[in-house]
Amino acid sequence: KRIAEYHQKYYSLSWNHDNEITITSGATEAIYCTIQAFINPGDEVIMFEPFFDCYQSDVILAGGICRYITLRKPLFDFDFNELKSLVNNKTKMIILNSPHNPTGKVFSNEELNFISKLAIENDLLVLSDEVYEFLTFDNCKHIPIASIQGMKKRTITISSTGKTFSMTGWKIGYAIAEAKLSEAIRKVHQWVTFSVNTPAQHSMEFAFSQLDNYLPKYQKMYLDKRNLVYKKLKNSKFKLFKPYGAYFYLMEYPKEDFFSDVEAATKLVIEYGIATIPTSVFYSLSEEGKSMLRLCFAKSDDILIEGIEKLLKL
């Protein structure tokens, strides 16, 4: 009921809490159940790269075929014609993630409308991963693709209380879709986790009741952390790509110091005590990922400053 209430209040989307909202063990389970529910062997699924790693794995586990379109730096935009060319009679679904992990991109209204038009014309499903829906910066606005005309009946919206309330280990997420789609998702969910622990659900219900008071502090905290990292590293040997959502930075490492992103990540953690992710693991088509690392700024300011100082000593 709380989830239905906030979707109505923030997005003017009306959902039936009995048969259109399914509580899952984190967004990860919601994504898995959705893909298992709708993707059959041979079905093609389009995803934007860099992609959150479970998308690719879940499609493969379902017997589906992944097709990729690259969000190209520095703005992480995509070619509309390239996306259109990927659609064929085997295409079943497009996976969308906005705000986007790991680039921090927030998809624009123009981009969402183009994706919607493509989905409607070709009768495609859209899995929309919106776990960072409340974490946008610099006046960027998150627009749920389900709110675009004609998209509600073909969109599965997935989000996570763990990201919104900084309790990722509690593992409470949800899949929102019209009743016919939700019925299929629930048939998989029943045999994966069956249900989510009740006490934590009560806690999250209370947390949602405090959303209006909570969000300004939450958003400011992460905006300050984003700006802290940028200010201290903008003149360093690392090139940062400023995010407009989520809590990650992509950054190019100095080519003279490392020959690959994997080597850079390995040396940074072993020799400097800094944990990053080599971004090539988020790509399957483009070579762009091999030039970057992902930083997470969902840490205390003390840890961020210590990590920045270590990077500056490189």
Image (tube, rainbow, N blue to C red):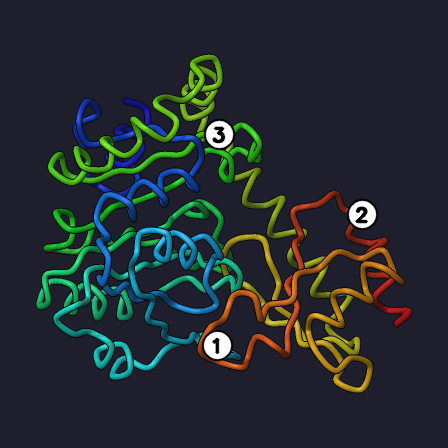
Gap between marks 2 and 1 measured at Cα = 28 Å
Q: Residue at x 16, y 40 (%)?
A: 181
- The residue singled out by tag 3 in the image is 213
Position of 132 with respect to 308 (left or right) is left
Of 108 and 284, the residue lying toward us: 284
Q: In the image, what residue occupies the spot 48% across and 18% down?
A: 200
Of the two numbered discs 2 and 1 on the same chain, state the one appearing first in sequence.
Answer: 1
Q: Is residue 191 above or below residue 305?
A: above
Badge 2 amino acid = Ile
Dots 2 and 1: beta carbons under 8 Å?
Answer: no
State the residue position of label 2.
303
- How many residues crowd mark 2 within 10 Å: few (<14), some (14–19), many (20+)? few
Q: Quadrant of the C terminus?
A: bottom right
User: Residue flagged by tag 1: what amino acid is it?
Assistant: Leu
The residue pinned by badge 1 equals 75
User: In the image, which is nearer the foreground, mark 2 or mark 3?
Assistant: 2
Residue visible at 37% across and 31% down in the picture: 192
In x, y percent, where is residue 31?
36, 45
Label 2 to label 3: alpha-carbon separation: 27 Å
Question: Where is residue 11, by image quadrant?
Answer: top left
Mark 1 or 3: the one toward you:
1
Tell me the quarter of the picture where residue 43 sits.
bottom left
Find residue 12 and report its horizontal and vertical position in percent: 21, 41
Q: Amino acid at mark 3?
A: Asn
Is 113 situated left or right of 74 in this image? left
- 130 on left or right of 103: left
Please state the total of marks drawn on the protein image: 3
Looking at the picture, tell me which residue is in the foreground, 42 or 12: 42
Which numbered disc, 2 or 3, marks the residue that appears first in the sequence? 3
Looking at the image, tell me whether mark 1 or mark 3 is earlier in sequence order: 1
Labels 1 and 3 touching (C-beta < 8 A) = no
